[in-house]
Image: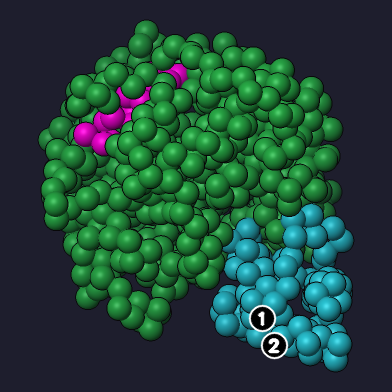
Chain colours: A green, B cyan
Amino acid sequence: MSQEDAEVKTLGAALLRAAERGPSHGLRFLDRRERETFVTWPEVLKGALKVCAGLRALGIEPGDRVGLVFPTSPAFFDGFFGACLAGAVPVPLYPPVRLGRIDEYHKRTAAMLRAASARVVLADARVRRVLGETVALAALELGCLGPESLPAGDAPPVRVTEDALALVQFSSGTTVAPKPVALSHRAVLAQTRLIKQAIMDSWPESDALQHTGVCWLPLYHDMGLIGCVFPALLHPSTLTLIGPEVFVTRPATWLRALSTYGGTISPAPNFAYALCVDRIKDEQMAGVDLSSWRVAMNGAEPVAPATLRRFVERFAKWGLRPEALTPVYGLSEASLAVTFTPFRRPFMTRRFDRDALATGVIQEAADGAELASLGLPLPGFELQLRTPERAPLPEGRVGRLWIRGPSLMDGYLGRPEATAATFDGGWLDTGDLGFLWEGELYLTGRAKDVLILRGRNYAPHEVEQSVDAVAGARTGCAAAASWVPEGADHEALALFVEHREDATTAQVEALPAAAADAVRAAAGLSCDLVVALPPGTLPRTSSGKIRRAEALKRYLDGALTPPKKVTPVHIAGVLARSGLAWLRSR
Amino acid sequence: MTSDLSTEVGPEMILKGIAEAARAELEWEGVLTLETPLVSALELDSLRMLTLVVAIEDHFEVCLEEGDEAGLITAGDLVGLIQKRLAVAE
């Protein structure tokens, strides 16, 4: 690591240093017509200083939380770095989606603002028009303001220590007890240096190679903010930013930007690579050259070997380097990355015996289940697989992944009990299940209840509560779980719903389709599998909590059966989306 | 289609435009009527909804805004919203 990088102790200091280096680098914003707006690092600093002064004039003190609701735009950075310079703690949250369900949005956003105990929210004018109810629900002391409508002031930046909080991020959006991940400047800068160092070690800069990133990831997501923006800031270099909605509606924009600007680094979740293969047409790739792209990290959701291969095959003729595809593993609680597969090495998959895997033992088998290696721990990180009772397991056994390293969160803000449950000494429980094989990490599933769909985490409760109002559904008796079926290129969402004792046959038959509609309307998610079950079928803990992972496991094993006393129909109704080969084969 | 035509754009034309956008961008095959429930018929999860929104914005050269969803259930509701936006664009 360079001595200079080590001397940068806070994000504010990193911005001051990037600005001192002059206007040759900065942030480039592309709109949906691929028109660019370039904001140099000195200009980013100028905007941030204004917001810093405004926030201080408003009475914001060091350590206060400042919510940020912006699309990918220069104003996001005015707000983000303005809060940093004021010694405050930015809390980036996602903006509402057009024609999305605004009532759900208000509830979720208000819950996150309350959990972070934000004093004020900064938002752009368009968002502010619809944010009133959120602000009312969150009972924000200072309300919602635009960066331009802050009071004028000339207060200078506030110096904070590296142990001060740098930002708060949410691992998943939920109305029920959201967990605000509190990250110190020390943690986020340690993570940023690790990413930068890994890239510079493998691809040193020269006259012929200057690193520059391209990012379409949301800025309220760790992979976008910490994985893309912070390395560009620390280096400093130029980062090209594309709004997530531009990417999901026109994925070719991403690859064209990599080509136009000679992007060397650009990460994305697995679904994005699949979306490119499925949606980009040859004519949209005219003149595109992807050979500058050295590192295409694939993380934030399970990595599907099928997707990696399809992407490499599809885009090889536009110069894509097969070794660019780099499966990685990380989580918000570790700031971001924990393992990288070695750069310059093609991604590696192995096949493991399914029956042995099911019993937690690892044996390679030529016709076994294929898993992608997620690589080696980053310098300073340690991995440990443990039993549910926290006893360490040897290599080659499946267990619960615990990690230790330099960029772990301080804890969940204001949630000491949740923090205590996650840490054991300096070790953090990831809630992920996996194993080490020849020193490299492979993941097999999750012990924690979280759905990971299109790179975003969802609380199962969000899906489950949307079916409570469906005719014939037993209130509070649904379980949502997601997993990657073998050969599929994304996680599938399964929903198990118990029907009411007094439900009519017609209601039970209509239940799967009606439940899928309800989930789509309320949560914006498509279910791949909906199963209606007789009352009492879902496995529960002794205290009556539904065991989601166990329900899914039993269903996949063909062992999800109703209690003996009720046996009119076993599996009352199933709705499976046609897209998945695995589901077709059942 | 440009906004100077919008005075003549009746509900049928708009409905046809929505159906075209859905067919082109969502690979949806079906018959759209004013009564069609949008979310279930077009299987609009958040990704497909966003794709449809952008396709409609491009097709009609209008801007749909955050908060526009209130009361939007059928294709007819969406037609009404687009008509309103086209009128503003005049």
Q: Is residue A119 visible?
A: no
Residue B65, given in percent of the width and then of the height, sits at 75, 60
In the picture, measured across the screen, residue A370 lies left or right of residue A252, that is left
Residue A384 is a magenta residue: no
Few, some or many C-alpha atoms within 10 Å of disc 2 (few <14, some 14-19, many ≥20)?
A: few
The residue that disc 1 covers is B59
Q: Secondary structure at mark 1?
A: helix
Q: From what the image shows, is residue A237 above or below residue A423? A: below
Task: Kindly indicate the quadrant of the structure image that contains residue B47.
Answer: bottom right
Task: Kindly indicate the quadrant of the structure image that contains residue B54.
Answer: bottom right
Few, some or many C-alpha atoms within 10 Å of disc 1 (few <14, some 14-19, many ≥20)?
A: some
The residue that disc 2 covers is B1
Query: Which residues are the magenta region?
Result: A182-197
In the picture, measured across the screen, residue A236 lies left or right of residue B77, that is left
Residue at 37%, 8% in the rendered image: A425
Residue A411, given in percent of the width and then of the height, sits at 50, 17
Residue A189 is a magenta residue: yes
Residue B46, given in percent of the width and then of the height, sits at 63, 58
Image quarter in which the N terminus of chain A is found: top left
Q: From what the image shows, is residue A189 above or below residue B5? A: above
Q: Secondary structure at mark 2?
A: loop
Chain identity of mark 2: B
Q: Give the amino acid type for the residue marked by disc 2 in the picture.
A: Met
Q: From what the image shows, is residue B76 above or below residue A503? A: below
Q: Are marks 1 and 2 in contact (CB under 8 Å)?
A: yes
Q: Which mark is residue A450?
A: none
Majority secondary structure in the magenta region: helix
Q: Which is more N-terminal, label 2 or label 1?
A: 2
In the picture, measured across the screen, residue A266 lies left or right of residue A548, that is left
